[in-house]
Structures are given as structure tokens and as C-alpha cells.
Amino acid sequence: MSAARPALTGTDFVEQRLRGTGTTDWRSWLLEGALLLSLLIALGILIVLVGDTLIKALPIFSERPIEFLTSIVSARPERAGILQAIIGSLTITIIVAVLAIPIGIGAAIYLEEYARDTRMSRFIRTNIRNLAGVPAIVYGLLGLAVFATVLRLGNILLAGGLTLAVLVLPVVVITTSEALSAVPNAIREAAYGVGATRWETIRSHVLPYAAPGIFTGTILSLARAFGETAPLLLVGSIAGTFNFVGPPWEQAFEGYTTLPTMVYHWSGYPQDEFRALSAATIVVLLGVILLVNASAILLRNRYDRKW
Amino acid sequence: MLTKRASGRPLLSLAMVGSLVLAGCVTSSPGEDDPDESGNGNGGAGSGSVIISGSSTVEPISSIVAEDFAAANEGFDYEVDGPGTGDGFAQFCDGETDISDASRPISDEEVTACDENGIPWVELKVAVDGISVLTSPANDAVSCLSFLDLYALVGPESQGLDEWSAASDLAEELAGELGRDFGAVNTPYPDATLEVTAPGEESGTYDSFIELVFEDIAEGRGTDPVARPDYTATADDNGIIEGISGTDTSLGWVGFSFYQENADVVKALEVDGGDGCVAPTTQTIASNEYPLARDLFIYVNTDNAAENESLAAFVDYYLSDEGIAAVEESSYVALTPEALEETRSAWEGR
Amino acid sequence: MTASTDRLSRPLAPSDLRIAGSRRHRENFIRVAFLLAASLSVVISVAIVLTLVGNAAGFVLQVDLAALWTDGWFPRRAMYDIKTIVAGTMVISAIAMVVAAPLGIGAALYLSEYASTRSRKLLKPIIEILAAIPSVVLGFFALAWISPNLVQAIFGAPLFNMLAAGIAVGILITPLVASIAEDAMHAVPAYLREAAYGLGARRRTTSLRVVAPAAVSGIVAALLLGVSRAIGETMIVALVAGATGGSLFNINPLDQGQTMTAAMTALAIGSDRVRGAELTFESLYFVGFLLFVFTLGLNLLSDAFVRRVRRRY
């Protein structure tokens, strides 16, 4: 604060504080430093991880990147590729999206907008919220028991897709519920005030407000399903080789594999070439997940607005 | 439902449709792998497809054979999975697979299960695998261990023994009781920390190790044939190699192919099963001189083989000189010519 | 987590009272459609719980109850010691929280109070995106880097140990904790900060004495969510904590251990999953049920705490 300045008003004073040009002591520096350090460590470790994987994957990407993406699995590392894994992961994501998202959003809309706040509805909400937190492998176990065994689907992709759809469903319900409950009642009342029915209100007032949150939530849960390993291994994704290649609508009824399954499978071999394959698959997996998440979050940030 | 505010949605739908179309284009282009209607994985009888499951040890061999056969035979579909020998047999005796890979012979319970479901099978030995007992290259003090040594160091009575030397007494006791049937003891052991890293109970390698090394000794001692419960057990064979090479006075065991691939960072110990110290090499394993050799098998559903020409042709190829070369390509030990002849006769006479 | 408005019961729309003709039909149709979706979700949830409980009960009824309190968890030899796997889960979750809580909350505090708006706009999405890294990736990283370079180098532990697994899990959940805590802090109304600055407080005091306490319900929610995720973490512990076939009771983090999730994985993905004692496979359901109960307990705890501490602005 220079002496030439006029006496500060209250707002000026606050502004200066907020900009941090006030007097600071060593404890403040220490705190700020420590906090910044924790941020950098958190980011740093994850960046090291990605970098380390990229280095390990370099042999594959420098020599045969396209072939890697378009070849089928092979017992010989120099020929192996992740075409089937990509199709498998993609098909499963589609199945999960088609099944879990409409049902989940619909259920959340009902629970938030239509159902009365009774003990039953609160119990249901608690139950669903609890299921959203249950570890994925439990769903794998249940998928094995119900889809693969009882429904005799066998080890086809559809069984895996159903398993993951059931896994993702509670999460979609919860995130949609949260987004819907964040809509102020004033918004709804405005619509009712001009004579809209409940559905018309939801469609024209509530959903647009909640859409960014719903959208992000569903995309994030799909991305999570994309990266799941253990449940699918349980339900029968092939950690081996096979030569079926087909479009998603055929793949759904055949033996299948996914990107995380291949990561797991190839890292179990002693030869270094297989570890490189594993690393390269991790790069592809991470790339897709990070890209999808980035798009979702950036889009949400763009469309998020305070009302 | 949504107004023009959330215009990210159409973008995403477009992307998904686009990727679907792309996937369809990529996969329906002509290639060596035109899909066949091979059903939903419940047995491939009657079509040009073969389903193989079972041991993850044998999986690399079967994969290579299947791949090469498919390359030479248009329209041949295969699936080779490796969930484990026991799993493989469970599926095999349920009629779900055509071939079961196995790193051990079929058990009595499994034979009964197959009988009950009317699944006839033939046992074909295809390769030999060894279990290498390993330590760190820095460990000069130990070069040979007998079954008695192994029992003393990692057997059921050794829980809590943290150093090699702590097991010396037990080893002497065993030598006194059981003589030289299971090899001579190599006491005194060095005065160093005993770090054991080896497969856990879920592994077939563990089972084989127990069966070969501990079972008879345990019977003599009246104990349960299991390893001591307090060693570092892991399913990750690569991790075992890392664990063994990482500590100076480590001890562990792993499949021979893993040892071969990492011979520069671990040291294999000679094993004495009662006939002197033998080092694990391709020759000693093939000739069964090395006491920790185990046979690798495939079990074929003979009914399916009769109905499915492709399956029969596939197994023919598997046992041919060209096909069986996959064993060595996978770093396992090939059968001796006599043993291979035996297998071929077994297949012919199914 | 955005701050939600008061949860009134749904306002009664005037049009609920009297809707004419086709609008009413469409309204009913849509309502029924949503009801079906909700019912289906409920049915699925109930089915999940019943399957789990039913099979777990089957296990408990058939098993020799003494097997549930033995020296260690060796399912293939019919030793189903519960305290082993629960202790393993506790140890690893505790280590994970020791890593994630300071890193996560520290990062959140920095982003919320110290970072400029522009860097916040850049860094916050990065952290949220990093929360999506699959655990299988972190598992291999832990084995390849964390365990040899951090744990073994400093403590001389074997390659597979609970400390390395705990650290990896902590790294896994740090973005999650940071993101939620940051949301909570950011949602603290500006006037609280302004009041503090108006009284002459420095940024440090405001952050620690005003913002953090105001956001405490969100911070606690973030931590509890982190714990919940840590407990449920599967691939990292299966790969790094060792003891796949079974483990003795152990709480020393420099040694290997068996968590509930790793026990399930080992049973299900092991080389020979159906071989073993009679109830080996059924024990999977039992452990799954234990996990379910733990998650439920944590959720209820979190609810109760958040409700009590949440302040209205």
C-alpha cells in the first residue's frame, strides 16, 4: 500500500485482499506452497504414469501403429493387435448406453419429479445409492450367476454388456437425481404458473437446466464401464486368442474381449514384447477414456449456467 | 426432450453412429477372418469351429497352433481361452468346449463328471514343462536343493522361519528320518534372510510343485501337503521374477518358460529328487531327469471329433511335426520322439 | 456436488387438478413410462440384493462356522477367516486415505482459494479427467514403479506389499476427493469470504478458518466417498498386495495382505477357480455380501454426518 494512495474504501480493501497484495507472512507462504505442492504432486504422479506407459508402448507405436489397431489377437506378439478388443469395448459401451441410460434417466425423473416423498421412495433411493457404491466385481459375480448361468447365455458379449448395464444403472440414476434436485423449485413454479402440466414442465424447464449435469454424469459412467476389467473377466471375456471379427451386431452374440482384458492378459507373459503390447493397449484405453471425459466435462462447462 | 441448449447431444449421437459405421466397414472388408456362424460358445460340434479352454500354461501353444491352422484353412474359427485347468475341465465335461488344455492329468472327480454327462475324451500329452526353482544371481551360497531342503524351507512346518539357517535343524531332522529317498540335504544353509516369492494356491504351478515335492514327504511326516502360509504368493509370474531378482537371498519357483525368458536376472538352482542334483535344461526336462518336470496335455472330446471334421483335422495338425513345433516356439520343452509317437498312437486309436 | 435447494415435496401443479383431453392422455402415458423405468430399476436393485444375500446365506448355513475364525484366509482349504480380509481392507484403505486426504484437500483448497480463475478453469477439468484413469493401469504402475522405487527402496519390503497398494489406491482416489472437496469449497458463498476479508483477515486465515469449516460437510462427503471407493478397489490390490491364493492375518503394511475385493478376484480369476474345498466358490458371494454391508454402512454414516453438519445459506 503506497502512501500516495487515497484512503481505501471498504470494497477497495476487500478487493486488495482478494488479489493477495496485502501483507503476508511466512506462514501464509508456507501454506500456499504446501497446497500448491499437493496439487502438483497429484498431477505429477499421474503424468509420470502416463509418460512411463507411453515410453513402454513406443516400440509398438513407432513400428506398427496402424497394424496394431487393425489386427486380431495373436499368440505371436509381432502380429498381435487390438481390433477385436476395440470392437468388443465399443459394442459393450453401446449395449450399456442403450440399456442403462434411458432406464436410469427415466427412473430418476420419476423418483425426483413424480414420486411423493414417502418412506418407500426414500428407501428406494438409499438402496439405489448404495448399489452405486458397490464394487464392480460384485456385479461381475452376479452377472456370472444370472446372465451366464441361469439365463444360459454363455460367454457371449451380451452377458458382459448386461452385467455392466446393471452396474452402471444405479450410477446413472443417482447422478441424474442429483442434477434434477439441483434445479430450483422456482423454475418449476414458473412453468406451472403458466399452466404447464408436470411433463411439460419437466421437458421445457427442468431438463434443460439439468441437462449438462445429466449429460456429464452419463458420459462419465459410460467411461467407467469402458475401463472395467474384473467383472468382465468373471463373466467370460476371453483372455486368450480367437479369430472372430465382426460388426457390433454380430459380435454381441459371440465370444469377445475388451481392451482392459487384453491389458491384463498380455501382462501375464514373460516376453518383453507382450509387455509392450500391454502398454500400448493402456495408451489406447487411456486415450479413449480421457478424450471422452474431456469432451463431456468441457461441454458441461460450456453449457453450465447459473440461474 | 432437450431444447437447443444442450446441443452437445446430437454431436455425440453422430459420433456414435459414425463409429458404428466405421466399425462395420472395417470388419466387413474381405480378409482371412470372415466370420462363420459359430454359435454362442456352447460347443462347436458340426461347424468349422473349435473351442479350446483350460490351462493358461498350455494356452500359448494351442493359440499358435490354432492361428496357423486358421491361416491355412479358410473359414476355420477358433477360440482359445486360459481361465485355468480346473475351469477348463468344468467346461469340457459340461460339453461346452471341444478341447481342454491341462497342466495336470484329469482328476478322478473330473472323470466322473465327464462320464455322467456322457463326454468321451482322449488324453494327449503334447509338451513337457519344468518348474524352475530360482534364487537371485547374487546368491552364491546355494546351488542345489533337494526335496528335503525345499520341504524344510518352504514346507508346512516352516511357518515363521525368517532365515535360511533357521531351517537347518528341520532339514537335519528330515534327513535322519527319511534318509536319502528325497535327496541329500544341503545344510548348513546361509545365515541370510529367506524371502520366498512364488505362485499362490490358486495356481496350477503351485499344485504341481506341492504334488511333486511335498506330498510324499508330508505323508511320511503326517502333515498336510501345503506350502508354508507366510510367503509372498502372487498370481503374477512376472512379478515373481521381479521379486526373486530384487532381493539377494530370495527363493521361489516358476514355470520353465518364465525362467528361460529371464535367465539373465535370476539363477536356477539344481534340484535333487533323490537321484542327485539336476539343472533344469530342455534336455533334462524332456528326458524326465529333472525331477520337477510336469506333462502338459490336451483332452479332446472324441464325439465332437467324429462329428466335426475341422476338429479332427485340427488335432491332426496339432500333432504333426509342423503343428507341434508350437511347443518350442512357446518356450516349452518338446516331447521326445518316442513320447510323441505314443501320443500320436493314442489319437489314432481314439 | 452442487448445493441443492430445499427438498420440498413436489409442488402441486394447478394443471394437476384438471387437464383436458389429449394432454391428459399424454401426461398419463409419460408418467406410466417413467414409472416403469423406476420399477425396473427397483426390481433390478432388489434382485441384486436378494441374489447376493441369498447365496451368502447359503454359504453361511453350509459352512462350518469355525472356519470363519482361523489363522488366515485360505479358501481353497476351507479356511475362511473373516478378520484377515477385513483387516487387509482396513489397512489399505487407511493408507489410501493418508495419501488422498492431504493431497486431495490440499489441491482442492489451492484451486478454490488461491488459483486464479483462469488456472482454475484449466486445472479443475484436468483433475476431473484424471479421476477416470482405470485401476488396472495404476495397478501395473504400482508394481513397476511405486513398489520398487518408493517402498522397497525406503523400507526394504518384498515386491508385493500392502503399502505400495495403499499408495496406489490413494493416488487413484485423490482426483475424486479433490474434485468433490473443491466443489464444496467453491460453493461457499462469496459473502462469507468477503466478510472475513472485510475484517482484515489474510487469505490463509480465511481459507482455513472460514471456507474450510463452511464446506466441511462437502469435504467429509468427499472423504467418505474416497474411503468407499478405496474399499471397493479391486484390480490394484489384486495385482500389488500379493497373497492371491490366501493370506495369514496381517496388519503390517510392509507385508502382503488380502483385501475383500482381492479375495474375490483371486477366487474368480485364479488359475483354477473351481478346484478346492466344497464351498470355495460360494465364499465369493459371502465376501461380496460383506462388501455390500460395508458400503451400506459407509453410506448411512455419510448421510447422517452430512445432514447434521450441513448448513443452510
Image: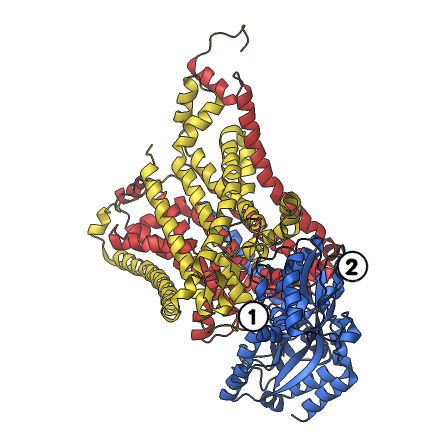
Q: Say which chain tag 2 marks.
A: B
Q: Which residue is mark 1?
A: A251
Query: In this rendering, would C10 be left or right of A163?
Result: left
Judging depth in this view, the residue of A200 and A83 nearest the camera is A83
Shown in yellow, the chain is C
Q: Position of residue B17 (x, y in %)?
A: 54, 60
Q: Position of residue A105 (x, y in %)?
A: 39, 55
Q: Is residue A227 something that shows in the picture?
A: no
What kind of residue is marked 1? Gln
Shown in blue, the chain is B
* Picture colour for chain A: red
Furthest-bottom residue in this view = B349
Q: CA distance from mark 2 to mark 1?
A: 43 Å
Q: Say which chain tag 1 marks.
A: A
| Up/down of C275 relative to C145, above or below | below
Judging depth in this view, the residue of B253 and B240 nearest the camera is B253
Q: Is residue C27 something that shows in the picture?
A: yes
Q: Quadrant of residue B16?
A: bottom right
Q: Quadrant of residue B51?
A: bottom right
Q: Which residue is mark 2?
A: B264
Quarter of the picture holding the C terminus of chain B:
bottom right
**Of marks 2 and 1, the one in the foreground:** 2
Query: In this rendering, would C16 be left or right of A144?
Result: left
